[in-house]
Structures are given as C-alpha cells and as structure tokens.
Image: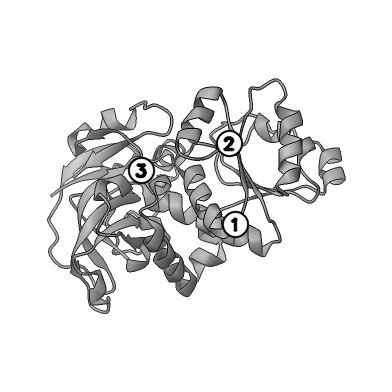
Amino acid sequence: MKAVCVTTDRKLETRDIAPLDTPPPGHLLLQMDSSAINHGDIAFLSRGLATAMSLGSREVWGASGVGRVIAVGEGVPELYAGKTVAAYRSLRPTPETIGLWSERAVVHPLSCLVLPETVRARDYSGSLVNMITPYAFLEQMTEEGHKGVVVTAGGSATGNALEALARRRGIPALHLVRNEAAKHELAELGITSVLVTSDQNFERDFEARAGELAATAVFDGIGGELIGRIAPHLPANATVYGYGFLGGNTQPGVTSLQITLKNLTIKRFSNFETATVKDDRRLAAALATLSEIAADPLLRTRIGREFSFDDIDEAMTYQAARGLKAVLVA
C-alpha cells in the first residue's frame, strides 16, 4: 500500500509499504479516504520537530484524516466497526500507530470521532484537530473564570469551530480579521461579531467590544505584533492563551506596565496539556459531544485542492485561498 513517510532528513517521500489486514489489540484499522495538510504539518517538519513525534516503525506521517473502520482490534468495542471516523492521531499516539497519510492507518479509538452517516467523509479530512482544540480551550477558560473570548485568527478553521462550540455554550466570541474581505467571508458563514485589524479605529472599537462581551480570554493563533496592539485595550484580568504562531517571529511588544496595570497573564495553550485531553473519560465525553454536532457547517474542512500521494511535494507547497486546505486522497 502507498504511504507518505518521513526520511531521516525530515523530508517526505511516497513509499510502498506492506499492507495491513489486522490491527493490534486496542486499535482500529482504517481504510483512509483523505487527509488534510494542516498548518501544523508544515510547521513540525520545517522546524525539525518531526523527530520528536512517534512515527512508529513505518515512519508514516499524517496526523489528521478521515476513513472507514475495516477492523477492530482485541478489546475495542464493536460499535466502531464499519463506521466512518475523523481521526487526529496525536490525541492518543502509541507505538503501534500508523500515520494517516497512508492507504490504511492504525489508530487508538480515543483518536477518533465517529461521524454521522448524513455527512460527506471528505469534508472532515482535517476537522478533528480543529474541533478538539477549541473544545478543550473552552473547557479550560470557563474553569479559569472567563466568560467571553477574543479569537485572533478569525476565519481560521479552528476559529470557525470555536464559534460553533461557543454558541452552544452561550459564550460570546469576538473574531479579529485582517481585512474587509475576510469579514465578509465570516458574515456569509453567519459569524457577525468581527473586527478588522486594519481599520483606522480598530483599537478604540476593540476596547469597547471586548469590554461589552467581558472577553477576558484571548485564543491566540497569531502572536506577534497583534498581541502588542490589543494588550492595552483588553479588559482587566485578561489571559492571552498562545496556541499558534501565524504571525511568525515578530515580537509582541507587551510592556511590563501593561501587564501590571491590566493584571494580564500570557501563557501557552496546548490541547495535549488540558484536562479534557489528558483524562480518558473526559476525552471520550468530548468526542461523543463533537460527534453529535459534527454536521454543523462550521466544523467542516474547507478543501482547496485534492492531491494524490505521488504529488506530495506539490501538495506541501500549495498556496490556497484563505482557509482552504490541500487534501491528500488515498
């Protein structure tokens, strides 16, 4: 079977590897439909972090994808058999796991979300990572006393998923985008609480709106200078949760005075470190909840172009319109 594997110098190559027919105990065998290339895939490979991840003996890459369960290992409930699942391998990586950029993959059940029969599988080829991250974040921010949230990467797949989940919990969310075109795109998706960072009066409007929403939690996938711009205008006792770095290496420019006056906290957010993901029972409950609401259009993967495994180099350099993704089709 074909698979996209990682070489010793962190490059990707398509290989023919021995096919699988039976999963190991405690695992699922998936016949893959497709796998999205997420920003994290490019970041991990380019920053040399791939060697720190468990790739298994077959060195197959791919954290996100969707496929059909064709066999269940010993100890796995039969309820998974034959189901279409969205998978995020990194939720429960094991030595037996085989990455999702393959015709067949092996994953732990707690790395999978059972999809409703009414949805198209390919529309969830990159969705689970973008669903579990805001789910775990909303759990953590509410447990830490926050009632509203600022989403710096408005229009991103994770930001859209957060909106869908926040609505169901009655949590107000304020999305930040770079231009009017992006604001219009969100309006077409039904997201109207949006500010454009390039507007002349952005800082003034941001301070007013964040205050109205009691948005003391900042879900930050951008970093860089944007945090420096909004820090002086956040409500008191706000916390910036950094989970992404789309803004590159630009310094945020937050001063000690701002931190002191606002009682501002800045810390990283990783879904792997949350109580939701670390605890098996909470993770299972989260996946069950997400399965129930997966048909929400805001939770779908927005596909820009489909590629075969043989075209992996082209797929990794594909530049799509904002929010669209390259997808590998098995």
Mark toward the start of the polypeptide (1 vs 3): 1
Depth order, front residue of 81/310: 81
Q: Badge 2 is on which residue?
A: 222
In the image, residue 255 sits, relative to residue 158, either above or below, namely above
The percent coordinates of residue 129 (x first, y second) are 42, 51
Mark toward the start of the polypeptide (3 vs 2): 2
Instruction: Give the side of residue 155 with respect to residue 314, left or right.
Output: right
Disc 2 marks a residue whose amino acid type is Ile
The percent coordinates of residue 37 (x first, y second) are 34, 40
Q: Does the CB distance between marks 2 and 1 fall below 8 Å?
A: no
Badge 2 crowding class, 10 Å Cα cut-off, few under 14, some 14 to 19, many 20 or more, is some
What kind of element bears circle 1?
Answer: loop
Badge 3 crowding class, 10 Å Cα cut-off, few under 14, some 14 to 19, many 20 or more, is many
User: Which of pointers 1 and 3 indicates the residue nearer the eye?
Assistant: 1
Q: Which mark is residue 261?
A: none
What kind of element bears circle 2?
Answer: loop
Q: Which mark is residue 301?
A: 3
Q: Quadrant of residue 8?
A: top left
User: Which of pointers 3 and 2 indicates the residue nearer the eye?
Assistant: 3
Residue at 74% across / 29% down in the picture?
A: 203
The quadrant of the image that shows the C terminus is top left
User: Which of pointers 2 and 1 indicates the residue nearer the eye?
Assistant: 1
Depth order, front residue of 299/82: 299
Q: Which mark is residue 170?
A: 1
Q: What colour scheme has been applied to the protein in the rendered image? A: one colour
Depth order, front residue of 35/138: 138
Residue at 29% across / 41% down in the picture?
A: 7
Disc 3 marks a residue whose amino acid type is Thr
Calculate the distance from the C-alpha at mark 3 to the C-alpha at mark 2. Answer: 20 Å
